[in-house]
Amino acid sequence: MSWYGCFGGEGYGFCETVDSDRTYEFSVVSTDTQQGEITFISDKDGPVNFVLGAYTFDQRNNNKYQIQTASWNMISKAAQHPYNMPVFGGALTGYGGTDFFTRYGAWSSSFFGSSRNLCLIRIDLKYEVPTDIQGFINEDHVRSKSMAVFGEMYVDLSEVTKLTVGLRWNDDTVKDSVASCLTFFTCPKYPLSQKLTGEYGFFPTQVTETDDALAYKLAIQHDLSDNQMVYASYTTAVKAGGNNPNSTGTPDPYAPRRDSGI
């Protein structure tokens, strides 16, 4: 048995004659990042100087991962089934996927080869499975946005000792839109209206994590000589929360992480 099948998705992939078992993996990643920073640095003659600034970050990361096999490819279009022409005279053409074959299996066990079976097929909803979703697919769209204002002040306590004090305020938002399906078999959010178009659509579960936080720095530097110094500091930092992608597409958020170091 052989047929001409296509693997991959819209804008990528290939078609070939399928006559044996095979498995293909696809991973398509696109990232778009925009960021900007404005910094003002003082240069005063006195014992106090400072840095003031603002920072913005906006990133979109889209990741589509797929596993496709010969068997999933064959049932994505019932026209490729070996019984289509010899048994049904081409009546299976235009149908496909687990939605159809689970019903077809139940019908054929009771009405195989009968005119009633053909009638049921003709009046059933008619659609095939788009190439993108003819196996396992995990599609994850993450948008990360951050805005921060920050400043540091440098104070010369003496000719050989300097104190540094810094503050940073962050406002972070991470939005994760993820969908994970094993063709139509485990894809409850995929609507019938989209199936009827014959084109792949993205219908995700969405999780949004937002947080704002204040971090700071305190440091002191003392010169022992022209070539030696001692330095001590205490700093804090915050990493934004988000969502862990997984094979089921279910929300798995994690909280912001706060760290400190000496």
Image: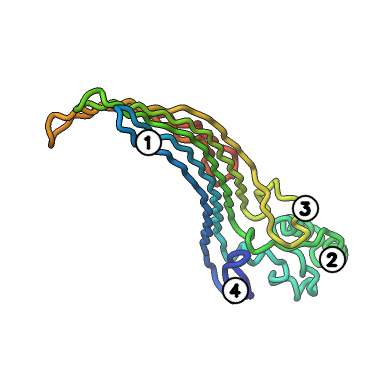
Foreground label between 2 and 1:
1
Q: Mark 1 = which residue? A: 42
Secondary structure at badge 2 equals: helix
Choose the circle earlier in sequence order: 3 or 2. 2
Is 219 on the left-hand or right-hand side of 126?
Answer: left
**Crowd around label 2: few <14 · some 14–19 · many ≥20 (10 Å):** some
Give me the C-alpha separation between circle 2 and circle 1.
83 Å
Give me the C-alpha separation between circle 1 and circle 4.
63 Å
Choose the circle earlier in sequence order: 1 or 3. 1
**Crowd around label 1: few <14 · some 14–19 · many ≥20 (10 Å):** few
Choose the circle earlier in sequence order: 1 or 4. 4
Foreground label between 3 and 2:
3
Give me the C-alpha separation between circle 1 and circle 3.
62 Å
Amino acid found under the numbered disc labelled 4: Cys
Secondary structure at badge 1 equals: loop
Amino acid found under the numbered disc labelled 2: Leu
Q: In percent of the image, x 64 and y 58: which residue is there?
A: 133
Q: In percent of the image, x 46 and y 42: which residue is there?
A: 38
Q: Residue furthest front?
A: 45
Task: Using the image, tell me which numbered label, if any, was put on residue 192.
Answer: 3
Kindly check if marks 1 and 4 are in contact, taking CB atoms under 8 A apart as contact.
no
